[in-house]
Amino acid sequence: MQKWGSILIAAMLMVLPLTACEGEGTSGQTGAGQESQQATSRLDIVRNRGKLICGVEGGIPGFSYVDQNGKYSGIDIDICKAVAAALFDDLNAIEYRNLDSTERFTALNGGEVDMLSRNTTWTISRDTTVGLEFAPTTFYDGQGMMVRADSGVKSLEELQGKSICVEAGTTTELNLTDNLRQRNVEAETLTFQQADPAYAAYAEGRCDGMTSDKSQLLSRRSTLPNPGDHIILDVTMSKEPLGPVTKNNDSAWFDVVKWTTYALIEAEELGITQANVDDLKQNSDDPTIKRFLGVEGDLGEGLGLSNDFAYRVIKQVGNYGEVYDRNLGEKSQFKLPRGLNDLWTNGGLLYSPPFR
């Protein structure tokens, strides 16, 4: 009996090294799998392609708008340009895809576009079950309501028995339903798959109110035949943090979009502009600025980018304040105050983690 026990112990001791080797082999396979997964990151796909494919709306002046000559402009467009500048040192290395609200997430998850920069609201369901990854918020907004100035309507309650146009497949549609229920207001809701037909229906008088983000209402009002004939009610129905979006589970690509966006905000806080970025890169003794612009350190390498990626972005696109001013602020037709979209040092919500 003692002999068999000795044989059994000896056999177990022989198996242990084999088991240990098998564990190392499995770990090695996992590592190879991780490397394979990293090799198929969207970052590699975009770099190998040589251009960024950016999903946008295309019909909202100030955010993303394409004119009759095919030229794109707006704050969302400038986010796309910033990513292209960081990647290729060329803000024009972009192909834009106009997507309506019902097809944008399918296009992103299916790989038709690399990212969305399309007035998309960050919500828990989109961040989880829809499979999206939200980069920093680039515009803090809230849902509003536009009506005709001569309608006499001053509140949501006064839309009782009237009709409201809204774009389908948006947080706007759900927010409208919730707000009307809370106020016991019964109104007819007319939904449209795309924004253009919705605003056209409102302009034609087929609905009494038009609801969307306040910034979008302000922008779209400027395209109506007589903008002064329409007012935006003094009511905010929701929180709408808008920003760029990537597909989930691709941290390498998400980090590029995320830190490129943060670079716009950090540059404004550091006082770096298109006009002074070259001088600061050559002459600044501030270690924070030298690190940010890639004169010192290797911050870009951690992202798979050139160390001067932030310099490229600011040189070609400008900082967040410059982007805001030319599209929505004092240098635009809208003259929209910064408000929540100002730096945290000025009482706003914009805040970048340290570049170090």
Image (tube, helix red, strand yellow):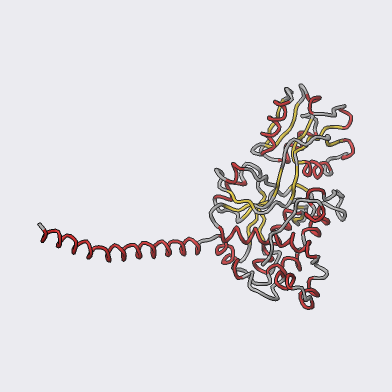
Q: Quadrant of the N terminus?
A: bottom left
Front residue of this view, candidates 275 and 302: 302
On the rendered structure, is 13 left or right of 236?
left
Front residue of this view, candidates 192 and 355: 355
Task: Give the residue at x 75% y 38%.
Answer: 143
- Counting from the top left corner in percent of width and height, residue 221 is at 83, 41
Snapshot quadrant of residue 257: bottom right
On the rendered structure, is 214 left or right of 303?
right
- Counting from the top left corner in percent of width and height, residue 44 is at 55, 64
Residue 352 in the image: above or below residue 100: below
- Counting from the top left corner in percent of width and height, residue 240 is at 71, 43
Residue 66 in the image: above or below residue 213: below
Task: Give the residue at x 83% y 36%.
Answer: 232
Residue 338 in the image: above or below residue 92: above
Task: Give the residue at x 76% y 64%.
Answer: 267
- Counting from the top left corner in percent of width and height, residue 341 is at 78, 51
Front residue of this view, candidates 353 and 335: 353
On the rendered structure, is 99 left or right of 13?
right
